[in-house]
Image (tube, rainbow, N blue to C red):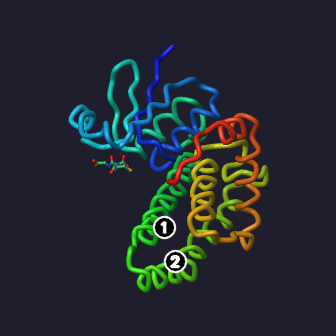
Amino acid sequence: MSEYKLHYFNGRGAAEPARLVFALAGVEYDDVRCEEEDWPTKKPHMPLGALPVLEIDGKMMTQSQAIVRYLAREFGFYGANNMETFRIDEIHEAVVELNRELYKVRAEKDDTKKKEVQQSFVDTIVPKFMNFFERRCTENGGGGGYFIDGGMTLADVLVYNITFNMEYYLKLSLDKWPKTMAVCKKVENHPKIAAWLKERPVTDF
Ligand SMILES: N[C@@H](CCC(=O)N[C@@H](CS)C(=O)NCC(=O)O)C(=O)O
């Protein structure tokens, strides 16, 4: 049995999708949270001087998106065939783009500019991606209530995580996209995920 350590800071951030996949799989891992003051000492030992890093039996693996794909593939949440995996990747890339835009809003320090960026995010970016997710809920054979017919995959977990963050950071209501939000509710209520959500540390980011 492999020994997993997930190194990150004390936040959800770029490590949370991997933590959610570990939770869904019911696989034990060491959730190593580096305090800001310890980071300068740890940084030179990381492959690209950044976190998250997944350590498996001493092997150091970097890049958050590669890590979460590796875990989803390893634990069976990455599609049953090439087309399903493509559909999951497509949603994954869309989530990465959406997250980049969300980060721009969060990172803006000037109040006036922040209002503008946030308004444009709400008016343009959110509908663009949420409409896409909503269509994919049905187009991918998602009659079973997931993005990919047949059960929960990485796609569901990633969309859950980004909608959680949009609601958390910007207090957005996403009720206009009921199919997508129904998938997210299923993720949130999955017994293994629900247990993690209850126990995970409450952090600012
Ligand atoms: N492309 C990388 C980016 C990693 C990254 O920039 N991580 C940030 C935290 S989210 C970090 O380690 N910052 C501290 C530093 O670069 O010293 C990934 O997705 O893993």
Q: Residue at x 55, y 57 (%)?
A: 91
> Of the residues shown, which amino acid type is indicated by label 2?
Phe
> Of the residues shown, which amino acid type is indicated by label 1?
Leu
Residue matched to label 1? 102
Q: How many marks?
A: 2
- Which percent across, then down, holds residue 126? 57, 73
Q: Is residue 196 above or below residue 27?
A: below
How many residues crowd around disc 2 within 10 Å: few (fewer than 14), some, or many (20 or more)?
A: some
Q: Is mark 2 within 8 Å of ligand 1?
A: no
Q: Earlier in the sequence, mark 1 or mark 2?
A: 1
Q: Residue at x 43, y 86 (%)?
A: 112
- Which percent across, then down, holds residue 111? 43, 81
Q: Quadrant of residue 183?
A: bottom right
Answer yes or no: do the residues labelled 1 and 2 have beta carbons within 8 Å?
Answer: yes
Q: Is residue 104 above or below residue 145?
A: below
Q: Residue at x 72, y 40 (%)?
A: 194
**Local SS, label 2:** helix
Residue matched to label 2? 121
- Which percent across, then down, holds residue 1? 51, 13
Marks 1 and 2, how far apart in space? 7 Å
How many residues crowd around disc 1 within 10 Å: few (fewer than 14), some, or many (20 or more)?
A: many
Q: Is residue 110 above or below residue 47?
A: below
Q: Nearer the viewer, residue 158 or 201?
A: 201
Q: Quadrant of residue 49?
A: top left
Work out which residue is located at the far top of the displayed protein and give it.
Answer: 1
- Which percent across, then down, holds residue 75? 57, 30
Q: Residue at x 40, y 32 (%)?
A: 54
Image-based side of 76 in relation to 108, left or right: right
Q: Quadrant of residue 37?
A: top left
**Local SS, label 1:** helix
